[in-house]
Amino acid sequence: VLLSIGENVAVLCAEAVDEKFRNELISSIKKTHQLILISEQQMNSFAGNLLQLKNTSGNNFWPLQSSA
């Protein structure tokens, strides 16, 4: 997974996006979200495989796989 988008944060492996579209995608995401860039190695370790959740107290969190 090369892109995960939450309420206010997005996680992206820009290396995995075609160079023709990379800057446009990054610019577009930054208009509405804080952007966290991950490496291709991190993506391959499932660091981009995220789902933002909200606990019973209303706090958002991102659980990660142990390999991430």
Image: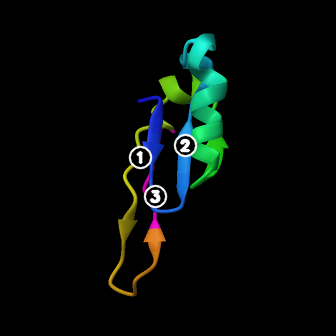
Q: Which residue is mark 2?
A: 11
Amino acid found under the numbered disc labelled 3 = Trp
Badge 1 or badge 3: first in the primary sequence? 1
Crowd rating for badge 2 (residues with CA inside 10 Å; few <14, some 14–19, many 20+) = many
Amino acid found under the numbered disc labelled 2 = Val
Q: Which residue is mark 1?
A: 50
Mark 3 vs mark 2: in front? 2
In this orientation, which residue lies closer to the viewer: 68 or 31? Answer: 31
Compared to residue 31, the image places residue 67 above or below, namely above
Question: Seen from this angle, which residue lies furthest bottom?
Answer: 57
Badge 3 or badge 2: first in the primary sequence? 2
The disc placed on residue 62 is 3
Residue visible at 67% across and 26% down in the picture: 23
Give the distance between the C-alpha atoms of the residues marked 3 and 2, in whole angstroms: 11 Å
Residue 49, how many percent across, how many down?
A: 41, 39
In the structure shown, which secondary structural element does the residue marked by tag 1 occupy? loop
Residue 57, how many percent across, how many down?
A: 39, 87
How many labels, in total? 3
Q: Are marks 1 and 3 in contact (CB under 8 Å)?
A: yes
In this orientation, which residue lies closer to the viewer: 25 or 56? Answer: 25
